[in-house]
Image: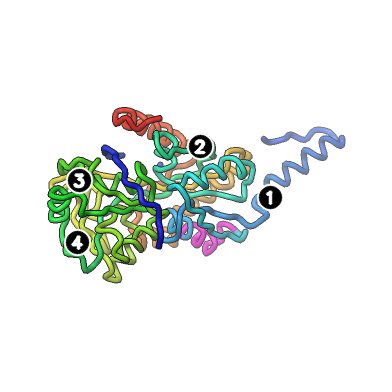
Amino acid sequence: MKARAKWAAVPLAVLMAVSLTACGTSKSTQGSESDSNKASAYPQKPITVVAPSGAGGGWDKTARSLTKVLAETKLVNSTMTVENKPGGGGTVYMAEFATKEKKNPYTLMVSSPPILINNLKKEGSSPYGYKDTTPLAQLTKDYGAIAVKADSKYSDLKTLLADLKADPSKITMAGGSAPGSMDHLVAILPAFKAGIDPKKVKYVSYDGGGEAVAALLGNNATAIGTDASSLESYLKSGKVKVLAVTSSERLKGTFKDVPTLKELGLDAEFNIWRGVFGPKEMSKDELAYWEKTLKALTEKEEWKKELAANTWESDYKNSADFTKFLGEQEKLVKDLLTALNMAK
């Protein structure tokens, strides 16, 4: 599989988710009633949920779990499909979503910290960010993980870091997002905390966690940094070894034997939130529909089982709280990138 190789010199810091009133019986009043009825009947057509990456990554799995449970529980009766639209670590589709789809309430998008990072960083940036959308809800939080192929000579992170420190040119780290974005931060975070110059770490970017794992399994990378949930099935099947996770405490289930960075003496955490976004020009009725529906989703047993199966933690925020959170995170990211000379 071919991918664009990018060696990035990125110092690291841890990032640390109209109603119309009828009066009278005039022609214009009848039109208002018709518009109101039409809005309240939303949705009436098939809905597309876009994962702005390739198949197999965290965005893809979130979109598929979301649509699966909404259909199974009949919270949404319209047909729902998932489309993968990779490119630029999410920047390619973000441009389309913010412009061509800004008035289309039948297309939603899942995203995570890159929607902030890509809009604020200096290189490979996007002119569009969360303010060009309608944040609908934060649903989950996940964590980063460092993994190697099952037959790799590395069985622990300490050994990998020792070789990386001795000769960085012999170690290739891969991830499913562009340099300076989320997977890159996860991939070189341990090295940064271990005192290794992150500018010397060779990082190869792929469009999505699935492609990054494929590169690892195809011996095109020494190790990968990505979200833990993307590695669940590969760890279960014995195809990879996960050397560490970026949570504050050990994860449960499949990852219960994987140490945290803190356990290994590296003072670092990385929380990967994920949420659902609508187009910027959604009506109040459409927003209200998704607020009610996504809140109901988080209370369903089917959704809770999906969270457990993917090693995700529930972290629900409604539209208003999610928007406020994004504003706070945007300021934090901008301050960090400015300090690292990576901001626009």
Report the residue that reaches farthest toward the bottom. Answer: 237
Mark 2: which secondary structure? loop
Query: Looking at the image, is mark 1 or mark 4 earlier in the sequence?
Result: 1
Label 2, on which residue?
A: 128
Report the residue that reaches farthest toward the front. Answer: 169
Question: Mark 2 belongs to which amino acid?
Answer: Tyr
* Residue 189 coordinates in the image, percent (x, y): 24, 45
Q: Quadrant of the C terminus?
A: top left
> Of circles 3 and 4, which is in front?
3
Mark 4: which secondary structure? loop
Question: Mark 3 belongs to which amino acid?
Answer: Ala
Residue contact between numbered discs 4 and 2, judged by CB atoms under 8 Å = no
Mark 2 residue crowding within 10 angstroms, few (<14) / some (14–19) / many (20+): many
Query: Looking at the image, is mark 2 or mark 1 earlier in the sequence?
Result: 1
Whether residue 58 is visible, yes or no, is no
Question: Mark 4 belongs to which amino acid?
Answer: Asp
Q: Is residue 68 in the magenta section?
A: yes
Query: Looking at the image, is mark 3 or mark 4 earlier in the sequence?
Result: 3
Per the rendered image, the range of residues in magenta is: 65-76
Residue contact between numbered discs 2 and 1, judged by CB atoms under 8 Å = no
